[in-house]
Image (spheres, rainbow, N blue to C red):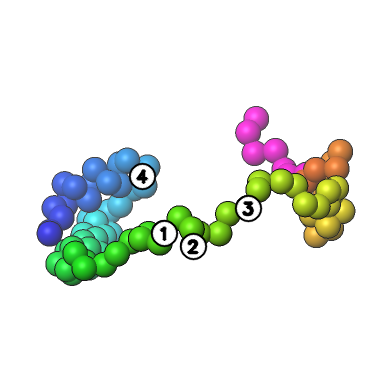
């Protein structure tokens, strides 16, 4: 599969990035390579591969219960700053 410069331009617009002509050509080449790999993967015959074919009796199941309580100190011990027992982060939206 080859990708056109118009498609590269559309992808850049959707990604909200600005590309000049040389960057668009380089991006086109890189995307062609990626889609080439994807095409190679689609050619692999996986019809004989069994996925998730384990009998239910062999699957491990456990109850979804809390086993340890109040790990606040362990969870926040590496936090650079805390506020009200929570991670403090800088404000990014005015």
Could you give the CA–CA distance between mark 1 and mark 4, rounded to whole angstroms?
A: 44 Å
Q: Residue visible at 77% across and 52% down? A: 67
Look at the numbered discs 2 and 4 and tell me whether their residues touch, using CB distance below 8 Å: no
In the figure, 36 relative to 82: above or below?
below
Marks 1, 4: nearer the viewer:
1
Is residue 89 toward the left or the right of residue 59 in the image?
right
Which residue carries the number 4 mark?
Answer: 15
| Secondary structure under the numbered disc 1 in the rendered image | loop
Within 10 Å of disc 4 (Cα), the crowding (few <14, some 14-19, many 20+) is few
Is residue 59 toward the left or the right of residue 52 in the image?
right
List x then y, in percent, for residue 68: 81, 52
Give me the disc on residue 11: none
Number of numbered discs on residues: 4
List x then y, in percent, for residue 86: 80, 43
| Magenta region, residue range | 88-94
Which residue carries the number 1 mark?
Answer: 55
Could you give the CA–CA distance between mark 3 and mark 4, rounded to whole angstroms?
A: 42 Å
Marks 3, 4: nearer the viewer:
3
Among numbered discs 3 and 4, the one appearing first in the sequence: 4
> In what quadrant of the picture does the N terminus appear?
bottom left
Image quadrant in which you'd find residue 23? bottom left
Look at the numbered discs 1 and 4 and tell me whether their residues touch, using CB distance below 8 Å: no
Give me the disc on residue 62: 3
Q: Nearer the viewer, residue 4 or 47?
A: 47
In the figure, 24 relative to 43: above or below?
above
| Secondary structure under the numbered disc 4 in the rendered image | helix
Within 10 Å of disc 1 (Cα), the crowding (few <14, some 14-19, many 20+) is few
Which residue carries the number 2 mark?
Answer: 58
């Amino acid at each position: 599969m080859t990708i056109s410069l118009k498609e590269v331009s559309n992808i850049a617009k959707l990604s909200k990035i600005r590309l000049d002509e040389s960057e668009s050509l380089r991006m086109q080449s890189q995307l062609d390579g990626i889609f080439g790999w994807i095409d190679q993967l689609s050619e692999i015959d996986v019809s004989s591969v069994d996925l998730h074919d384990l009998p239910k009796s062999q699957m491990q199941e456990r109850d979804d219960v809390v086993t340890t309580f109040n790990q606040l100190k362990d969870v926040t011990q590496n936090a650079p700053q805390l506020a009200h027992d929570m991670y403090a982060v800088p404000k990014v939206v005015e």
